[in-house]
Every structure is written in structure tokens, then in C-alpha cells.
Image: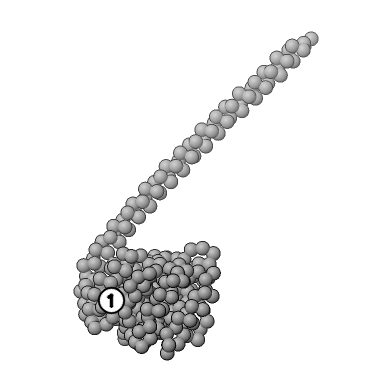
Amino acid sequence: MISLKYHAVSLAAVFLALAVGVVLGASGLSDRLLSAVSRDRDSLSTQVDTLTAQRDGLLDQQAAADQFAARIGPAAVAGLLAGRSVSIVQAGGDKSDQEAVIRLIGQAGGTVTGSITLTDAVSDPARSDQLNELAARLLPAGAQLPAASDTGSLAGGLLGSVMTSKNATAAGQAGAVWTGLADAGFVQPGTAPGPADMIVVLTGGAQQGGDAGDSAAVIARLAAELDRSGSGAVLAGREGSASATGPIGVARAAGGATAGLSTVDDVQTGSGRIATVLALKEQLGGKAGNYGADRTATGGAVPAA
């Protein structure tokens, strides 16, 4: 007769066998998982190494291209802007870009009359009404604002009235304009530039935040209005500036409203800085184009000299 003890021992043996099976099965599964993870790790590590090498190679190529551009830059632009004057508007651009462009303008025979630096408040939608009102109030006697009602056009019209040689009479009232804009926090305090034939607007990459598109549009339209106010303007930005939320991207997508404005989307590079000066020369001839590394640069890397 089978005793209760026998049943207990039998059940214990069954459970023990099951437990051993689970442990052995789990151990085999664990080994397979670890093996798969190890293979994935090795594959990812190889990919990272490959991408790192590609990145380093591209950086080396870019450095070589910039060195080449720096060497040929003076010869490429020599004499193109002889007797011409240029003002700089900093709208989120990098100081190094400004210094390099100013140097090339000088090597092209041009004169830089000075620069102004716009604050982020200019492209802040929350302060658009204040800037619109200020543009109308500070406008020099005899000058006119554009018929457009957007902030970029109105601000560009005000700046153009005192920054361009075509408005020499209004330029005599520039002091009050710069003081008013600086006091309201739209322009950084500093020495005001003298009137110039043309203007370079320097910007950074893509705008950030929920109102990025609107902010980019302000800079794009401001530059377009400066182009109409004088003998031409170039909007030059860094990588990302030709995106949908970048000032150059907005300008290129606007069509007729910005058709007369030249744009350069890689001013952080040597070729982009040369393109900026060549685009100024192009503006003097009544032409415009879109240049740089982005696919929307329909004119190629640089304008024809």
C-alpha cells in the first residue's frame, strides 16, 4: 500500500524536477539573450566607430575647405566693392562671422560704416505691438514706412530710413532713432553706424520656441525691407538658418515678397563668407540669389564673381 509519505516524496521529486528544469531553461535563455546583446553591442560599437571616423573625416575636409577659402578669399573679392559702403545688422549672428565678413568687405575695397545689434525683443511676438508703435513714432520727418503692417517690414522700414545712403536727409535724425530703440530694449547700446549703400544682416541658425516660425519671419521681412530701402541687402545665416523655422528658410519660401534679397545659409564657413561678399556685388547689379549648402540654395555654393 502506498503511504502518505510516499506521495509526499513523489510530489517533492516532481516539483524539484520542475524547478531544476526551469532553472536550466532560464539559464539557457539567459545565455542566448546575453549572446544576442553582446552581438548587438559589438555591432553598435562598430557603427559608432564608423560614424565617428566619417564625422572626423568631414570635419577635416571642412577645415581644409575653410583654409583654402581663407587663402583665396582676398583674391576672389579684390576690388568688387571699391568705393561702396556697407553696414552690418546683427540679428542673432555670431561675432566671428561678423569679423570675417567685415575683413572680406575691406579686402574687396568696401567700407563698413558700422554695425548695430538687435535684441531678441525685435522678433518676440509678445512685443510686436510695442515695436510697431515705436516705428511709427520714431520715423524721421520726410521718411515713409512700407504699406505692410507686419512687424518685420515696419522695423526694417525704420532702420532703412537711417541706415541707407538713399535716405541721407533722414539719416541726420538717426541719433533719436537709435536712442529710442535702445531705451526700449530693441537695440543694444553702442555707436550708431553711418549711412551705407548696402546692408548685411547676420543671423544664426533656426529660431527656437513655440513662436519660432513667427520670430524667423520678422528677421526675414526686416532684411527684405532693408534691401528695398537701399542699393541691396544680403541675409546671411549659419547652419539651420535655411530650415522652416530659420530666417533664411522663411525668406526663400516667401517668394515675391523677398525676391530682391540675396541669402547665404552657411556664413560660418569660409565659402559662405566669400559668398556673402560676392552677393553684395551681385546686388549692385540689380540681381539676387540664394547660396550656401542647403538644398534650397538654388544659386549653388557661391555667386558667380
> Is residue 292 in view from this perspective?
no
Residue 68 is left or right of residue 254, and the answer is left
- Residue at screen point 50% across, 86% down: 147
Residue 175 is left or right of residue 245, and the answer is left
SS of the residue under disc 1: strand
Reading the image, the residue beneath label 1 is 112
- Residue at screen point 73% across, 15% down: 8
> Is residue 139 in view from this perspective?
yes
Report the residue that reaches farthest toward the bottom. Answer: 142
> In the rendered view, would you say 58 is above or below 42?
below
Front residue of 273/37: it is: 273
* Three-letter code, disc 1: Val
- Residue at screen point 49% across, 75% down: 131
Where residue 152 appears, as percent x and y from the top left, is 47, 77
Front residue of 18/260: it is: 260
- Residue at screen point 64% across, 22% down: 17
Where residue 281 appears, as percent x and y from the top left, is 29, 81
> In the rendered view, would you say 61 is above or below 78?
above
